[in-house]
Image (cartoon, rainbow, N blue to C red):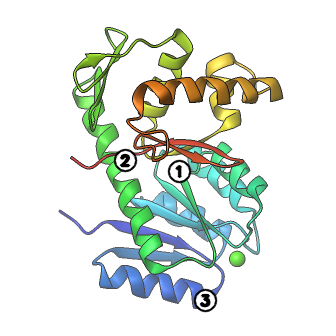
Amino acid sequence: MNKPQILIVEDDNAVANLISATLKTQDYAYKRAATGAGAVMEALSCKPDVVLLDLGLPDMDGVEIIKKIRSWSNMPIIVVSARSEDFDKVSALDAGADDYLTKPFSVEELLARIRVTKRRLLAIQSTNKSESVFVNGNLKIDYGAGCAYLSGEELHLTPIEYKLLCLLSKNVGKVLTHTFITQKIWGAAWESNVASLRVFMATLRKKIEPSADSPQYIQTHVGIGYRMIKIDD
Ligand code: CA
């Protein structure tokens, strides 16, 4: 197999050097771009396995780059941003980014995010192959039959809980924003729907999480959204 190719989009040379050096030690291949236009060109020509994208670039806003790439590709995009405001993360995720890292971050954190993103791709590819059954840890969803199971026992879910579980599972490993989820479930992202989402998420978790204090399947990103964690086999 070829080395996984990572596209580093970063206008700060010191940060780009640090990331490239880290990737090199882990046997990843990489390309670099320091502008938005360069990033879009590299994404088109070298078809990277993962894009690490700085949001603040001299010529283009990172969110615009995500929208451009998403118009023709589903390649994983991890936003690497100095902006700590939730608003930026939310607009990047809504535009189609897969995950985010806030600067300053540790090398371990960066590598962990890349691994999660790669696992997510593999999980999606294998789900497509076996078509209608999703398995993650002790959780199993038979999309065709419309049933979900935990450790072999059928879960008794309400239609909305089931819809939520399917949506999270089909995007396993990816942070889904409140806006994205409420739009998919109710067709609109009203503030009242975000409140309902919290309620349904709580009831769903009661049914699938072994312990309320340390959730295994669904992670909360405060002020942003939720993610289903891919559990290692
Ligand atoms: Ca920058």
Mark 2, ligand 1, within 8 Å: the answer is no
Pick out the residue farthest to the left.
1
The numbered disc on residue 62 is none
Residue 102 appears anywhere in the view: yes
| Mark count | 3
Q: Earlier in the sequence, mark 1 or mark 2?
A: 1
Which residue bears the numbered disc 2? 120
Q: Residues within 10 Å of mark 2 (few under 14, many from 20)?
A: many
Q: Earlier in the sequence, mark 3 or mark 1?
A: 3
Q: Residue at x 50, y 79 (%)?
A: 106
Q: What element does badge 3 sit on?
A: helix
Q: Residue at x 42, y 68 (%)?
A: 6
Which residue bears the numbered disc 1? 98
Residue type (three-letter) at the residue carrying disc 2:
Arg
Residue type (three-letter) at the residue carrying disc 1:
Asp
Q: Residues within 10 Å of mark 3 (few under 14, many from 20)?
A: few
User: Mark 1–mark 2 contact, CB under 8 Å?
Assistant: yes
Ligand 1: which quarter? bottom right
